[in-house]
Amino acid sequence: FFFFFFFFFPTFLPSQFSRTLPLTGIPLAATVAFSLSDLSRCSHSLTLDLAAMATSAFGTTTATSNYRNGGAANARNLPKNSSVKSKTGVRKSAPGSLGGGGAASSSSKDDAGVPGRVRVAVRLRPRNAEEMVADADFADCVELQPELKRLKLRKNNWDSDTYEFDEVLTEFASQKRVYEVVAKPVVESVLDGYNGTVMAYGQTGTGKTYTVGQLGDEDMAARGIMVRAMEDILAGVSLETDSISVSYMQLYMETIQDLLDPTNDNISIVEDHKTGDVSLPGATQVEIRDHHSFLEILKLGEDHRFAANTKLNTESSRSHAILMAKLVVVDLAGSERIHKSGSEGHTLEEAKSINLSLSALGKCINALAENSPHIPVRDSKLTRLLRDSFGGTARTSLVITVGPSPRHRGETASTIMFGQRAMKVENMLKLKEEFDYKSLSRRLDIQLDKLIAEHERQQKIFEDEIERLTAEAERQLSDAERNYVQALEKERSKYQKEYLESIKKLEEKWIMNQRKSVNDENKLRHKDVGSNVLPNAKESKVAPMEENPEMKKLLEKETAHRKAVEEEVWTLKTQLAESRRSEALQSSEIVKLRKMLDDEAHQKEKLEMEIGKLQSHLLQLSVEADETRRQLDSGGSEEVLSGLDSLLHQPRQPQSDNSETGDKESVAKLFEQVGLHKILSLLEAEDADVRIHAVKVVANLAAEEANQEKIVEAGGLTSLLKLLISSEDETIHRVAAGAIANLAMSETNQELIMAQGGVRLLSNTASSAEDPQTLRMVAGAIANLCGNDKLQMKLRGEGGIKALLGMVRCRHPDVLSQVARGIANFAKCESRASAQGVKAGRSLLIEDGALPWIVQNANNEAASVRRHIELALCHLAQHEANSRDMINGGAVWEMVRISRDCPREDIRSLAHRTLTSSHSFQAEMRRLG
Ligand code: ADP
Ligand code: MG
């Protein structure tokens, strides 16, 4: 039985320029774990024989960095020489592939892969209770030397065989440490975009399931690799944009059953003939939101597995569990031979079938380790599913588990040998890059929602401000009016009071005067009788005369007051008029603001319409992406239909009941008419995120040959070149350069790129870039241009060769491999031109100083670099004009080495022919004896 889980988490990754890379719609699956565990624990006879085999491998730096496979993410941690030596001599790397079509077979194409050996750790289980008793008198059959990374397998009391592994984990090693050493580097590289495998192999009862599948329900510290891997994956992705799905299956006697849907009991393996990718599209996928939901799925699967096994009357003990997520965690079947475990009620046929997958795996590993031309990958479902894990493109860690018991020495020895052979298997790691339109759509949706919310907030602030201003103005106005009325009233009452008072005073005075004059008259009348008339008469005449000036004064004062009041009234009246005017002004201001508000609302409506359009367009893109993915996954029409079905849940297209082809055409058409231009216009979007996504979309489209012409026609190439200058963003540079590299595969486009000054733009990008992946894309683009016969002079004139050589400052093998490819392409064109008599004189590569680097790297440890340089040397050596420089530069030795040691027969014989046909080289070889 095998159990599979698939994780799937799309992430945004740049496109790839090499056509050999799998740029398909296949889900970025997953972690795989197999377990075929717990064979019946019958005891076996005790054997204590020892054999010695010394091995030496990596050994200097820390376990974690050593353990991690080589590749883009951590090439600096790679040990200098990744081959492993054994007593029998230096072992060559084994570039074959379970999947075929590996590095060795793709000679002219550039696969942009990075070599990385399968890493193997050995873990010893502590003695269990039974062994404590039964083996009490015997020493363990293995002895570990973790600091030397060695395992000694006892042959007898005085002799043992020694084996070296990448990591040696003692019986005290914690689950955490095992995870960190064995699986974490693989999980990290999965998050970086590689496929990865972690696999456990060993005899039943030695701890495969404990290592890989332990849930740790009761003891946190006992959590195994699957659970910890999921924790790290969940921590490493953002669920806002990425998703993780899990499938859970079991394989028994070459039949795959879905453990999340027990009725689905015969899932077929689908292989993409173009890319060689393997998938299981029939399996149920459940999306994981958090760790809890993952554990639920594991438990549900376990329950169904139990039920399925009961129904089939099979033992769950003979089961593999596979967890796929781009990362393959494998808990394999017990490795003991079937006849030994025997007697389980199986017929011979059943027994063969149960063991078929495991023995097929062993055969493939052997074939790979021996560098055999034929890898029997098709012999079983297990090897078909794992074709990428051994000799393929995944990073692979193998943990072999052994028990201490001397009774099982034979099995332990065979497990160790399996591990030793696996250490010889080399993979070509490739970034698994795929563009996920659904995520883009989700991202843009989030972006739009943020913008809409922001707009709404701004509008609210604006409206509040207007309201506040209006209220303020009204308040001021009414204040002014009130103040005016109050002041007017005060003034009026003040003057009225004064006026009345003065009138009253005047009246009083007048009355007093009246009285006085009456008195005086009376007195006068009295005195007329007496004498003294004159003075009195005089007096009475004087009084009114004295009175008059006073009255006059009072009256004058009164008049002045009146005038003042009148003036005051007038001033207040003008003030009132003034404030009336300003009130009018303010209300016209309010009208203006209201109009602005209306405009704003109108603008918003327009924006919303635009958003709606964009959303529907995104939906269309998702439809297309889904459809393409499903087609690529399966090549079957069923999946296409079901893909469309799933889209029907989204409120869309009334034409959903159209025929399949009609739908497809309309999507394609829409993409052509609206999509491409819209996407290209997004390259200039203001939002940097949108720009980055747009360039990624363009890059992915550019990776498909079918789209390239359309992209160039729509001005996409020009826009991409522009981005190299206009943008400062390294991601944009990287992705744009990748897209340009893709487009630079056709001759017409190469000419267009040259004509638009592309070489200078790429050179500038190269000189400022730091990220190896950016440099790799730029180097890839220039390397493609290097392969155009017509552009040689111009390319060199504009500094293309110098730019390539400048990029070797980044020692990353991906970059070096592209530089080497460019040089090989250039040399090949030159060689052609020389042969046709079009070109004379030294190679421009030599003129530009490339030779020292070529010679230094002719034996580079990365096969992809070496291969190109070997070819470049052969081309250069064909022309007498280069021979002096080559001899002085030490290239002859490299040629000799290539002619003898190159594993590629064609290059080897080319080097040999070249050497023997060149007089200068012959003379030099004679001179050097
Ligand atoms: P396998 O899957 O290889 O058949 P299991 O993982 O089921 O083996 O382990 C067999 C038994 O040994 C289990 O009871 C398990 O708990 C125990 N065991 C295995 N490895 C260890 C270990 N490193 N430390 C403690 N117990 C272990
Ligand atoms: Mg097991």
Image (tube, rainbow, N blue to C red):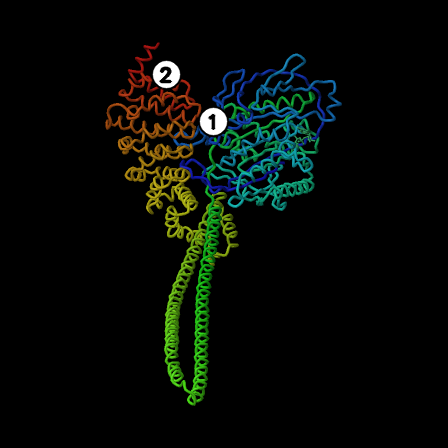
Instruction: Estimate the spatial distance between the alpha carbons at disc 1 and disc 2, rounded to whole Å.
Output: 29 Å
Q: Quick one: quadrant of the N terminus?
A: top right
Q: In this picture, is 289 found above or below 860?
A: below
Residue 96 percent coordinates (x, y): 48, 27
The image quadrant that residue 42 belongs to is top right
Residue type at mark 1 is: Arg
Q: Are marks 1 and 2 in contact (CB under 8 Å)?
A: no
Find numbered disc 2 in the image and state the secondary structure of the residue it sits on.
helix
Q: Earlier in the sequence, mark 1 or mark 2?
A: 1
The quarter of the picture showing ligand 2: top right
The image quadrant that residue 744 belongs to is top left
Q: Left or right: 470 with respect to 763?
A: right
Q: Quick one: quadrant of the C terminus?
A: top left
Residue 574 percent coordinates (x, y): 37, 70
Q: Is residue 339 visible?
A: yes
The image quadrant that residue 312 belongs to is top right
Crowding at dot 2, Cα within 10 Å, few <14 / some 14-19 / many 20+, comes out as some
Does the numbered disc 2 mark a residue whose Cβ is under 8 Å from ligand 1?
Answer: no
Q: 270 or 59: which is nearer to us?
A: 59
Crowding at dot 1, Cα within 10 Å, few <14 / some 14-19 / many 20+, comes out as some
Q: Residue at x 33, y 20 (%)?
A: 914
Task: State the residue position of label 2.
Answer: 893
Does the numbered disc 1 mark a residue whose Cβ is under 8 Å from ligand 1?
Answer: no
Residue type at mark 2 is: Trp
Task: State the residue position of label 1.
Answer: 76
Determine which of the numbered discs, if any, sits on residue 855 in the image: none
Number of numbered discs overlaid on the protein picture: 2
Outermost residue toward the front in this view: 531
Q: In this picture, is 882 found above or below 191?
A: above
